[in-house]
Image: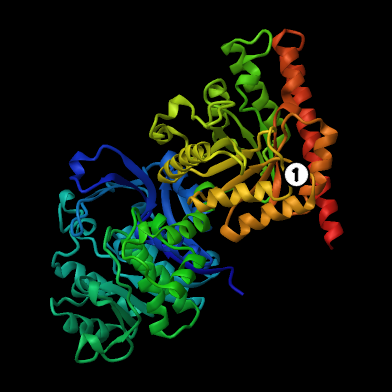
Amino acid sequence: MKSLDVITIGRSSVDLYGAQVGGRLEDMGSFNKYIGGSPTNIACGAARLGLKSGLITRVGDEHMGRFIREQLMREGVDVGGVVTDPERLTALVLLGIRDEEHFPLIFYRENCADMALSEDDIHEDYIGSARALVVTGTHLSNPRTEAAVLKALALARKNGLRTALDIDYRPNLWGVAGHGAGESRFVESGKVTAKLQSTLHLFDLIVGTEEEFHIAGGSMDTLQALRAVRNVSSATLICKRGAAGAAAYVGSIPVRLDDGQTGPGFPIEVFNVLGAGDGFFAGLLKGWLEDADWPTALKYANACGAFAVSRHGCTPAYPSLGELNFFLERGVKRPDLRNDRELEQIHWSSNRHRNHGGDWSEYRVFAFDHRVQLEEMAGYTPGKGAAFKELCLKAAQQVQAGRPGYGILCDNRIGRSALHAASGTGLWVGRPCEWPGSRPLELEPELGSDCGGLHAWARENVVKVLCFCHPNDDTATRARQEATVKRLFEAARRNDLEFLLEIVQPKVEPVDDETTATLIQQFYDIGVFPDWWKLEPMKTATAWANAVSAIETNDRHTRGILVLGLDAPEKELAVSFEVAAGFDLVKGFAVGRTIFGDVARGWMKGETDDDAAVAEMAKRYQRLCSIWDEARVAAREKAA
């Protein structure tokens, strides 16, 4: 048994995608950062489709190199072949979307890390761990990287791997076009043709556009070019023909291009062609490595390519396996796939862990995002408030001890220093948006009326909003609150931020086993799909069952539910944990004042020093974690 399905080898870069669409690259005002490079994209796309993929490349010993490595791991790509180069910088690419036909880009690849890949970076045990090896053409353009590729191919043959080539012709990267011609996809070059033809016999599968086969075959006539390739290679040839689809040619080349084996196409709007071929290749790999027939493999490939050309970015556009299957079963509802809300919800929710990582099968969250409760304490000052929240963070990290499954809720108004310090610690970080105690709901002024302030948030921050609501709310109040929640939710999605909705019922209205479930359904009905729910500790199993059913009926991909505390005594929380822990969708708790309330009052008045405050809060937080864990174990033992 092989531990990997496929290894790709070659380019790895950071793509800086212009956020503005329809303008010149010269005029771009902001950029979105993604990982890029054809083999990197293919490895990620394959991983999203359930294949075990790995990558051989080099990255710099700096922030962008670490970003690539960390993002590959979040995507599920094995990084055993990723080498950190101590001397060279990670490659960068600047890209833009001008219109449906023009996609300007600039490669920053002078002496970059991935072009320093050498034979010493190729290890037989790693190559032998895979079923297939995919090579991309750029790394045949330089003697050093070519030697590495040829060694990898020789080891692949020795160890029985399938081998594939993505021609991936970029004239700029072969030195036959200038820096300003990054968008160019074809320049004739006998030198490039000769180099490619010297290696084509090493592959079982060769994939390219018509123009890429022109350079590989040395002819501007596609049929003649395919025949020239066939003269030196027995590989299956996959020719991508744009709107005409793609075709597989096994054996002799037919008299017409249309006589190749084809798969169904998908009538979609072209928004961005950059990276589409890599998405196509990932889908093709799924079929090829499953030994599907070529029409089926091309169906997967065409579908993945359709996703890619309809979305912003390369790797972020590729589908998960669940998303692909849903699309193939349901079909195209609207040609601009990025605006298909049902499809985009599945895309977001089935890929979101690749953006945020972490093992969140259990959530133990210390909530100290409180503002009014601190401001009303005797002895409070803004400086003291900030310092106390730093102590809360220390207590949380003391309990976390570097382990997954722990988190905090922290605000930016009082707790900014703690919020920023939490970045990169491995803690789950939620950040509140509501103006404390507001009903109807108002948001923190720093967000702006359009919630544009979310643009400045760290990507690991989860947007959290508390809404005091009840099914019996009058029409005006309900409409106003739902509009605010939806505006915030949509802004969070635009900024690639996860969203947590906390709902608390005003105590002046009656509450029964249906109340929370009814509220949950009302929010789904207006198109709000929280990644997380934070719910009151309901007293009956029936109430929890109704709430869980309402969520799972609308969103089977939700992250889960956190139980909030409402300053309840520890014993009372323990009872509520016992009930909630019986439901798998309830993943843990987010409790605050039960942990810090008494400590804060004493500390603000100078009755408790810093070390004692941290120790006491850590003790209480750890005790709640233990109570939750014990409740979960007991619930599972009972169910078994």
Q: Quadrant of residue 40?
A: bottom left
Image quarter hosting the N terminus: bottom right
Is residue 154 or residue 587 the one in the foreground? 587
- Residue at 41% x, 63% y: name it: 42
- Residue at 61% x, 47% y: name it: 519
Badge 1 crowding class, 10 Å Cα cut-off, few under 14, some 14 to 19, many 20 or more, is many
Residue 592: x and y, percent? 70, 30
The reply, left or right, for residue 328 in relation to residue 384 is left
Residue 396: x and y, percent? 69, 31
> Tag 1: residue type?
Met
Is residue 290 or residue 215 the one in the foreground? 290
Is residue 373 or residue 186 the one in the foreground? 373
Instruction: State the count of labels.
Output: 1
Residue 249: x and y, percent? 30, 86
The residue to which callout 1 is attached is: 538
Q: Is residue 365 above or below residue 234?
A: above
